[in-house]
Image: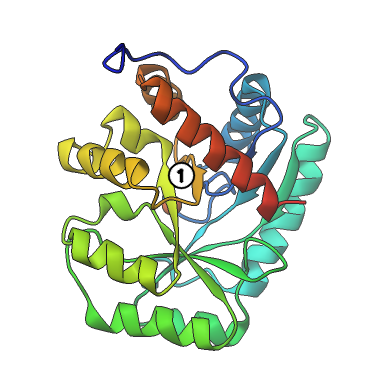
Amino acid sequence: MFGFLTHRLPEDFFQGACDVHCHVLPGVDDGFPSSEKSLQALKAMEDLGFEKMILTPHFMKEYAGNDRESIEARFEAFKAEAAKVSGMELRLAAEYMLDARFVEHFRQGFLALDNDRHVLCETSYMMYEPQATEMVYEIMLEGFQPVIAHPERYEYASRENYTRWKDKRYKFQLNWLSLAGAYGKLALAKAHFLLEEGFYDYIGTDMHNLDNFMRHLNAIRLSGKDMDRVAELLENNKSLFR
Ligand SMILES: [Fe+2]
């Protein structure tokens, strides 16, 4: 009867939560530019209730300097710095663009989200690239579990694409800010459709900037049913970081 009513996220919604996608590792991509800003973000996330964060810097041809070795060294240095001011548990993984350098990154050994070899992958937003689908399938054959980052943001993707990906058992990760309309009306509509149809497995902040994230997070309004659905995804996140 009151299905049209929407609500803010409850204050304790993120208590004990785990984030599985963010660009908080400083100075390595288009996310946080300095340790100082990254440490502010960790504190803000702790205030929200988060206890664990998986840092997922971009691995794509635009950031040619990001190879496994250099990113691991950067992470160790940041983790030591963070431990002085924050109790947040941190883990390093990566967000892999399915581009021309993907195979090279595969050969370096993926930085997976967890020990079960979940690998966070993204495609171009605008353009469907058939080789991207082939690459994802290849890594599945190698024993990895692809997790498609923010599928709602891919403008080219139709219901048919989503269904095909799901049939291949790729997992889907929703971005919180898609639910705030931060990436436009199409991504918002797709996020609701995919959420209501049960396509998603995980939910992530994909945080690049703290102020932008907090502003949009505060704008999210969800129906009771959608609130239950995102709570379930948040619970699933914990299975990646035990
Ligand atoms: Fe991302």
The crowd level at tag 1 (other Cα within 10 Å; few <14, some 14-19, many 20+) is many
Tell me if 37 is positioned left or right of 217 in this view.
right
Tell me if 25 is positioned left or right of 15 in this view.
left
Tell me if 98 is positioned left or right of 124 in this view.
right
Residue 78 seen in the current view: no
When the figure is inspected, residue 192 is found, relative to residue 148, above or below; the finding is above
Q: Mark 1 — residue?
A: 206
Question: Nearest the camera: 121 or 64?
Answer: 121
**What kind of colouring is applied to the model shown?**
rainbow
Res. 15 image quadrant: top right
Res. 136 image quadrant: bottom left
Q: Amino acid at mark 1?
A: Asp
For the N terminus, give its image quadrant: top left
Question: At 34% across and 85% down in the image, what residue appears?
Answer: 134
Question: At 68% across and 69% down in the image, what residue appears?
Answer: 116
Question: At 75% across and 39% down in the image, what residue appears?
Answer: 82
The mark tally for this picture is 1
Residue 10 seen in the current view: yes
Q: Is mark 1 within 8 Å of ligand 1?
A: yes
Question: Nearest the camera: 49 or 44?
Answer: 49
Which x, y percent locates residue 56? 55, 55
Which x, y percent locates residue 90? 72, 47
Tell me if 211 is positioned left or right of 179 in this view.
right
When the figure is inspected, residue 3 is found, relative to residue 125, above or below; the finding is above
* Disc 1 element: loop
When the figure is inspected, residue 50 is found, relative to residue 221, above or below; the finding is below
Question: At 51% across and 81% down in the image, what residue appears?
Answer: 140
Which x, y percent locates residue 182? 28, 33
